[in-house]
Image (cartoon, grey):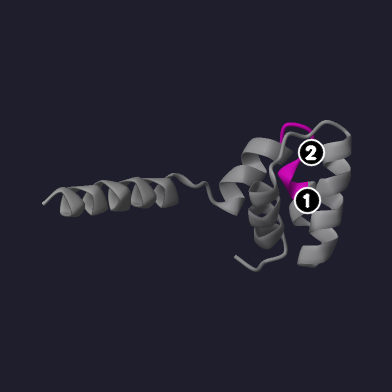
Amino acid sequence: MKKLATVLILSMIVTSAVYAAESGEDLFYKRCTACHSSALSMGKKKDEIMWKSTIKRMKKHGASISSQETEAIADFLSGKK
């Protein structure tokens, strides 16, 4: 019974963490549009690698974006997700 309770609790934690993750689109609007218009970024035609490079450069300018957020934003902007 104790093992079952532990498994249920862990699965609830994992499930809530997955659903709490923000989409690349949400992160883009939250992190990037503070300095850039969405139209400017959305009008650029870059692949995922080029967007990651751009985000890395923005991090050097002070953008607070984690590695996971970088992946999600680059996927969104490149049209991957």
53 sits to left or right of 10: right
Q: Distance from label 1 to label 2 (Cα)?
A: 7 Å
At x 10%, y 52%, the residue is: 1
* Location of residue 33 (image quadrant): top right
Disc ID at residue 36? 2
Label annotation for residue 75: none
* Looking at the image, residue 39 lies above or below residue 46: above
81 and 38: which is toward the camera: 81
In the image, residue 80 sits, relative to residue 22, either above or below, namely below
> Residue 81's x, y, as percent?
59, 65
Q: Which residue of the protein is positioned furthest toward the left in this rendering? A: 1
The disc label shown at residue 41, or none: 1
Query: Which residues fall within the magenta stretch?
Result: 33-39
Amino acid type indicated by mark 2? His
Query: Does residue 31 appear in this view?
Result: yes
Near-viewer residue (5 or 71):
5
* Residue 46 in view here: no
Q: For residue 55: magenta?
A: no
Answer whether residue 36 is magenta in the image: yes
